[in-house]
Image (cartoon, rainbow, N blue to C red):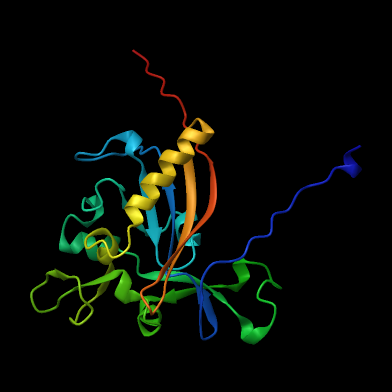
Amino acid sequence: KHENEKMAIIIMEMIGKKHGNLFYPSMSGVAQSYNYYPVSHMKRDEGVVFIALGLGRIIADGERCLRFSPKYPAILPQFYSTNSTIENSQNYFYALELNDGENPMRMGLYNNLLRVDLDIAEKDNELKWIASVVSVEDNITRDSLSYKGPRVLTFAPLLKWGDFPICDILAYLLKIGRHLLGCPVEIEFAININKASECEFYLLQIKPMVIESLNVKR
């Protein structure tokens, strides 16, 4: 009977770090084993990653985040010029408000998520892992926060300098996931980077990726 039907509920630990009255991870993201929009040397089956500072709502809602191929992390089409870098870079993030120790989920998840400016993350010492600066002196993107200028989230320490092997990890998980599930997959993940330079990678979810067939009419 319909009234006897039951639904399973999975309760997962929320990933992040406590900064004052806010809770959020260093970064979160989604990786897909099929890239609908490859450019340059990219191939569709090499995958694509969407990554952002803070909670993953910004990715799920289609807002500004960084898009790259795990095989070619240096190719960032959305940052083709200095102006495009400033225009397309993430300029805020989402964090969970802890309500001074009260139940943060009492009013529902979205009612407790705050939209926070990047300067808060810089005070929390999170931007040094992911941000660059468009220098006001020469209008060049510098991979250091010691310059004056707008902060842009290029994730250069990870993608350019390899401080954390995120591309290798995601490429491996996409390969394993596709092999085991027998189809393209989508992965949700989060990363915490701690003061001791110890990084924590969390695999939150892996599921089949739905790919629609292409119909060509002539």
Q: Position of residue 160 (x, y in %)?
A: 22, 60
Q: Residue furthest top?
A: 218
Residue occupying image coordinates x 50% and y 72%: 24
Residue occupying image coordinates x 32% and y 38%: 46
**Quadrant of residue 138 within the rendered picture:** bottom left
For residue 74, side relative to residue 35 (left or right) = left
Q: Residue furthest left?
A: 138
For residue 153, side relative to residue 187 (left or right) = left
Q: Which of 33 and 118 is in front in this view?
A: 33
**Total number of numbered discs in the rendering:** 0
* Image quarter hosting the N terminus: top right
Q: In this rendering, does residue 116 appear at all?
A: yes
Q: In this rendering, does residue 210 appear at all?
A: no
**Quadrant of residue 52 within the rendered picture:** bottom left
Residue occupying image coordinates x 20% and y 82%: 146
* Image quarter hosting the C terminus: top left
Q: Where is residue 48 in the image (x, y as percent from the top left)?
A: 35, 45
- Up the image or down, 131 lies above or below 119; here it is above
- Up the image or down, 122 lies above or below 93; here it is below
Q: Where is residue 21 in the image (x, y as percent from the top left)?
A: 55, 84
For residue 47, side relative to residue 19 (left or right) = left
Residue occupying image coordinates x 47% and y 29%: 212
Q: Nearer the viewer, residue 50 or 81?
A: 50
